[in-house]
Amino acid sequence: MAFANRVDAGRQLADRLRHVPADAVALGLPRGGVPVAAEVSRALGIPLDVIVVRKLGVPYQPELAMGAVGEGGVRVLNDDVMRLAHVSDAALQAVEDEELAELSRRTTRLRQGREPVPLDGRTAIVIDDGIATGATARAACQIARAHGAKSVILAVPIAPPDAVRSLSDVADEVVCVATPGELSSIGQWYDDFTQTSDDEVARLLEEADARRPAAATSTEVTVSTDGVHLPGELTVPSGASGVVVFAHGSGSGRASPRNVQVAQAQHEAGLATLLFDLLTPEEAADRSNVFDIVLLARRVRGAIDWIHDRSDVGHLPLGLFGASTGAAAALMAAAEVPSSVAAVVSRGGRPDLAADRLTDVTAPTLLIVGGADVEVLELNRRAQASLVCRNRLDVVPGATHLFEEPGALDRVAELAAEWFGTHLRTG
């Protein structure tokens, strides 16, 4: 396996990190780790920062680390090395002062006035472009934890197996795309291993700041409709220009990682989202309910009414995002309350299951299907022929039904954000 460049490596690494919690922070090790971390940040919709560490070398043997220092004066020491090397307090202080001065110079250059992203109580993902010995990565994991991270994930595109094993004692999880038995140099695994400059690091941090969504509030809610109480999560960015109700399908719920990822992209675009369970646990246990489009559409309509009754988002233009059978429910609901729905997006949906109502849909509708999802693609093409509203069918090349291929779900999120951004803003 070879990576085209650090961006390509970051994309592949991001696909291994889809499970990380929403509170995660991508921490790139300067300089080469930052382009990799920037792509992980973009793909997962999480903040990007750098983690600058300086090794504390034994005075008479500098290559032997007795500890490390990080920003804010955070220090970690290797007590065994300190004891065996007989390093005095004065000698330790002299080394620490020198390394802190260099650390301050580097962070000033890289951050250019930006404050570090707080790590207290969050998941820190320490990222480099590869690991040879792992000494710097080890120090970075320790520094991240000392800064208050509740958990630490070390993520790299390439590392030898023994390094992965040895670093498991400082990281809660080590994620690596490739672990070749022989690794003479990191650069041999990249087609383009051009050195990353300080200016490039500063630019990537600035771009990540620009992508960061406006302050958003997420609230656990209960949608009471149709005689049941359905749990959900309502997220509202500051200055939201629209709201999107998610209708999942095939038995998944509001915590579906694919819908959560798509929802995060909508937040970045300034749109509020409601992810909620369409079925109670008892109802979901009956598999036939998953394909009861009339029932699911009734629940979607109930969520629409619930949204309209709220003072915070009730005035916003509303869109529906449906996946699998949820897409049919979204289209049926849009047909039944046309004045309430401004746009619909279907991801790998089954619009054919709402065939008798497709001609009644007036909201602009986007159908997104994977190019390798042959059967569903054909069903969508037939359904599109029945739509009389403004519509478009977008095919994501090479993607299968769940869009698990590298970059596939990112493309879904982008297409949905573009569609809703256009049609919800025009109402």
Image (cartoon, rainbow, N blue to C red):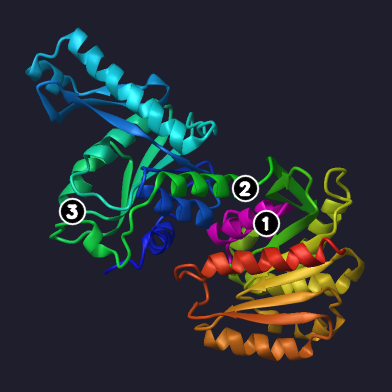
Mark seen at residue 266 = 1
Residue 54 part of the magenta-drawn span: no
Labels 1, 2: front one? 2
Q: Residues within 10 Å of mark 1 (few under 14, many from 20)?
A: many
Tell whether 297 sits left or right of 340: left
The residue nearer to you, when weighing 74 against 155, is 74
Q: Residue at x 58, y 65 (%)?
A: 251
Magenta range: 251-280
Q: Which residue is mark 3?
A: 161
Labels 3, 2: front one? 2
Q: Quadrant of residue 384?
A: bottom right
Residue 292 in view, yes or no: no
Q: CA distance from mark 3 to mark 1?
A: 38 Å
Look at the numbered disc 3 and give the secondary structure of its residue: helix
Q: Amino acid at mark 3?
A: Pro
Q: Which residue is mark 2?
A: 210
Q: Amino acid at mark 2?
A: Ala
x and y percentages locating residue 200 in the rendered image: 45, 49
Q: Residue at x 69, y 44 (%)?
A: 214
Q: Amino acid at mark 1?
A: Gln
Look at the numbered disc 1 and give the secondary structure of its residue: helix
